[in-house]
Amino acid sequence: MSWILGYSKTQYTHHASPIPLIAKDGSKISLEEIAQSSIPPCRLNPFLFNGHLQTMYTAWKHPGPPVFYKRHIFTSDHTVYPGTFAVDFVVSKEDGEAATKDAELPERTTNYPNKEWDNVGSDDNKPMIVALHGLSGGSHEVYLRETLAPLTAAGWEACVVNGRGCALSKITTPQLFNARATWDVRQTIRELRVLFPNRALYAVGYSLGANILTNYCAEEGEKCVLKAAVANSNPWNLELCHVELNRTWVGVNVYSRTMGKNLMGLYERHKEQMLQNPGIKKELVEKSKYLYEFDRHVQCPAWGYPTEGAYYRDAQSVDALVAIRIPFLGINAEDDPVSQDWKRELCCILALLLTLLADLLHSRHPVRRVQAESLHITVHHRLGRPSWILPAGWWQVVRNSHSVLPEQSPRHYRSQCIPG
């Protein structure tokens, strides 16, 4: 009956032989030990007694803490994914209120003047976090501000990489963001290393942003410059999530329809640019009601996928864990309506077994040395997608420690290019 008081059970899943982390004092500790000692018990509203209610509650309008941003527009340096994207940097309340307001940007967000951006670099050694939002979201989202507000108050620097077309940003190519596209976060982190060479960089992603962040960490492998990363409510296996959403009336008519409606809002805002792609048919797009229909009629022709299933299979991050070489914390709810836990765990196990088999057949290295999974911890609790709202003190999990990398280099992860 503990649910009456809002108490939920937290479980930790990790590799059987975790790679130790070395603290500043030289002692060794596992990521699981740090997590269990730092993450407090999960106490939720007892009136929101299942994942559906929790998820619906997060969609209600709530002011949240005020966070002020200044936006810089980056020009992509990727040949497959040209165009521009917006990164919002957290600034002080004084700087935010003194800046010139722009009605075309979200609340408390202004543009960096060119001269000010030219002098934004620093040699300070403050920790800095890079955040990625969920599907069709942006830096203005409450769950992001709830995370960034206490961090910046504690002396951290922060920025949010907005998906293309999100957070009232403009697109300059016929493409929105993509669940597989890690290039913008990669370029942002590369730029941050130049602007702030002494800062320790961390990252946190939510939902679709968590999927992108997981793929990024895997693609970078042992070259990843992030000290640690946190993935919240990652859908992991997008194809399986697609099947589950379309299996029930609630999945189709509540979740898939709501997400489809949000994406159609982005389409309406950017359709003049998007319809420059001859593969995107206006009459088909504007009949779309559900998430999979939008992906079928917009994302597939925009990116060269034959079906939405092919898009989901290529974009999902379930098989990425075995290539990650940094401390990596995943937080999921067991009754998340979008990503159901036991099915996700099954897919993780299958992906790991397939990877071990592939390494056995094709690698010169012994299978026993494939250890990347040891850096992954998944925290499970009940009650829906509010794992978006991190428990207080979560950032202590990744502070003041660094990883001891395994001897083996990660297997070659999937290409950084979308087909075509």
Image: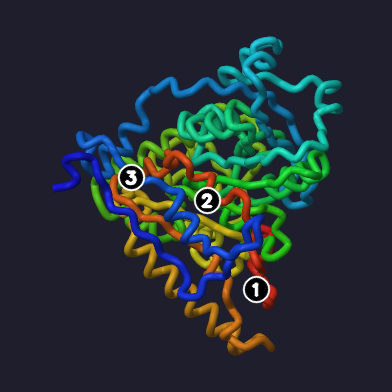
Q: Nearer the viewer, residue 137 or 58?
A: 58
Q: Quarter of the image holding residue 153?
A: top right
Percent position of residue 146, x then y: 48, 31
Q: Describe the element under mark 3 as helix, strand or loop.
A: loop
Q: Describe the element under mark 2 as helix, strand or loop.
A: helix
Tell me if I can see residue 158 in this picture.
no
Q: Earlier in the sequence, mark 2 or mark 1?
A: 2
Q: Which residue is mark 3?
A: 42
Question: Which label sits on residue 406?
Answer: 1
Name the residue: 68% across, 46% down.
Answer: 201
Q: Earlier in the sequence, mark 3 or mark 1?
A: 3
Name the residue: 55% across, 41% down.
Answer: 281
Percent position of residue 414, x then y: 64, 66
Question: Which label sits on residue 397?
Answer: 2
Tell me if I can see residue 147 in this picture.
yes
Circles 2, 3 touching at the beta carbon (< 8 Å): no
